[in-house]
Image: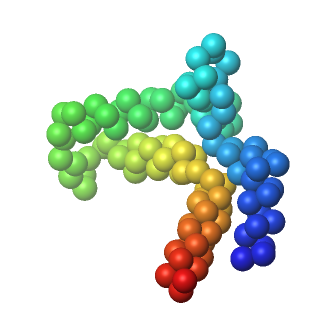
Amino acid sequence: MGNDKIKLNELIENPEQYFVLLKPSLEARDDNHTIELKVEGYRDLFCILSDLLQTTRLALDGIELSTGSTVNIERYIGSLLRIIEMLIPLEEAELLDILYRKHLNENNNNASN
């Protein structure tokens, strides 16, 4: 538990170390945030956007792909998975673990009293 206290103090003093996925927007409203997606350049960005559109189009059309199809569904699904992976807030997960352990310890202490 002592280690958790040190980490909680770190959170209070340096919250930017734990909250890294969402960034405050430059807009005047403080309830807007931005998320950074890393791309290798404009070509990569345009390919990702094209793949997203194509995947959506296929889903809306309800096309059943056969093994002999010329559509490269793996590429489109790969782009979707890449974006999903970028949106998983792994750094924030450490904070949630710390808070959850603190919660469990408090519950155990309250149950023993």
Q: Is residue 54 visible?
A: yes
Instruction: Give above or below for 73 relative to 52.
Output: below
- Quarter placement of the N terminus: bottom right
Q: Residue at x 66, y 33 (%)?
A: 23
Location of residue 8 by image quarter: bottom right
Q: Is residue 108 visible?
A: no
Q: Residue at x 17, y 39 (%)?
A: 62
Left or right: 1 with respect to 14? left
Location of residue 2 by image quarter: bottom right
**Residue toward you, 58 or 110:** 110
Q: Residue at x 63, y 42 (%)?
A: 21
Left or right: 31 with respect to 74? right
Instruction: Give above or below for 93 relative to 103.
Output: above
Q: Position of residue 14 (x, y in %)?
A: 81, 48
Q: Position of residue 75 (x, y in %)?
A: 44, 46
Left or right: 71 with respect to 24? left
- Quarter placement of the C terminus: bottom right
Instruction: Give above or below for 48 relative to 90.
Output: above
Pick out the residue farthest to the front: 113
Q: Residue at x 63, y 15 (%)?
A: 27
Pick out the residue farthest to the top: 28
Instruction: Give above or below for 53 relative to 21.
Output: above
Image color mode: rainbow
Q: Position of residue 13 (x, y in %)?
A: 82, 48
**Residue toward you, 47 or 11:** 11
Q: Position of residue 77 (x, y in %)?
A: 40, 48
Left or right: 14 with respect to 22? right
